[in-house]
Image (spheres, rainbow, N blue to C red):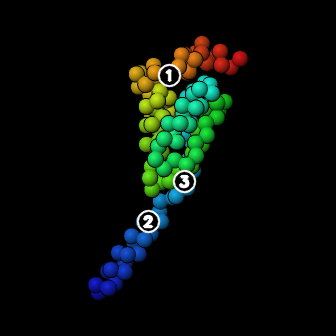
Amino acid sequence: MKKIVTVVIVMFLSFTAFAQNKNARASLDVDGVCMMCKKRIEKASLNTKGVKSAIWNVETHELKLIFDERKTNINTIAENIAEVGHDNKKLKATDEAYNSVHPCCKYRDEEIKEEHKK
């Protein structure tokens, strides 16, 4: 009986270990308006342990990620992006973080958004 229980426990643990994806892919909508924003968003993402790739599209505001689920998750990445001043679908940046971005990157300001569309 002890052998059966031990085998079941070992099997359960091995299945749990395989449940996490080494190369998970996800996307996240992140607010920004320019190439400086792109650099800041991608850098914040890549500085998160476990993130292998981060590419943000200026026009669509979509951040495409490849990361190791054993080391991080989408919520941690979203937190790090918000900490450098960029709102995303998961979190809104604090006013202090938002105010730290360059004046041309003030994506909450409608005038700035219009200037970047030209």
Q: Which mark is residue 17?
A: 2
Q: Tell me if label 2 and label 3 are in contact, CB under 8 Å.
A: no
Q: Which of the two marks, 2 or 1, is nearer to us in this view?
A: 1
Label 1 sits on what residue type? Val
**Depth-wise, is mark 1 or mark 3 nearer the camera?**
1
Q: Are marks 1 and 3 in contact (CB under 8 Å)?
A: no
Q: Which residue is at the far right?
A: 118
Q: Secondary structure at mark 1?
A: loop
Q: Nearer the N terminus, badge 2 or badge 3? A: 2
Residue identifier under label 1: 101
Where 81 sits versus 101, above or below? Answer: below
Q: Earlier in the sequence, mark 2 or mark 1?
A: 2
Amino acid carrying label 2: it is Ala
Which residue is found at the position 32% from the left and 80% from the top? 5
Q: Position of residue 111 (x, y in %)?
A: 60, 12
Q: Residues within 10 Å of mark 3 (few under 14, many from 20)?
A: some
- Within the image, what quadrant is residue 104 found in? top right
Please say if 17 is above or below 92: below
Q: Classify the position of the N terminus by image quarter.
A: bottom left
- What residue type is disc 3 on? Ala
- How far, Cα to Cα, is label 1 from label 3? 29 Å
Assess disc 1: are there few (<14), some (14-19) or many (≥20) residues with their C-alpha within 10 Å of its C-alpha. some
Q: Secondary structure at mark 2?
A: helix
The residue tagged 3 is 24
Q: Residue at x 57, y 28 (%)?
A: 37
Work out whether residue 18 can be spotted. yes
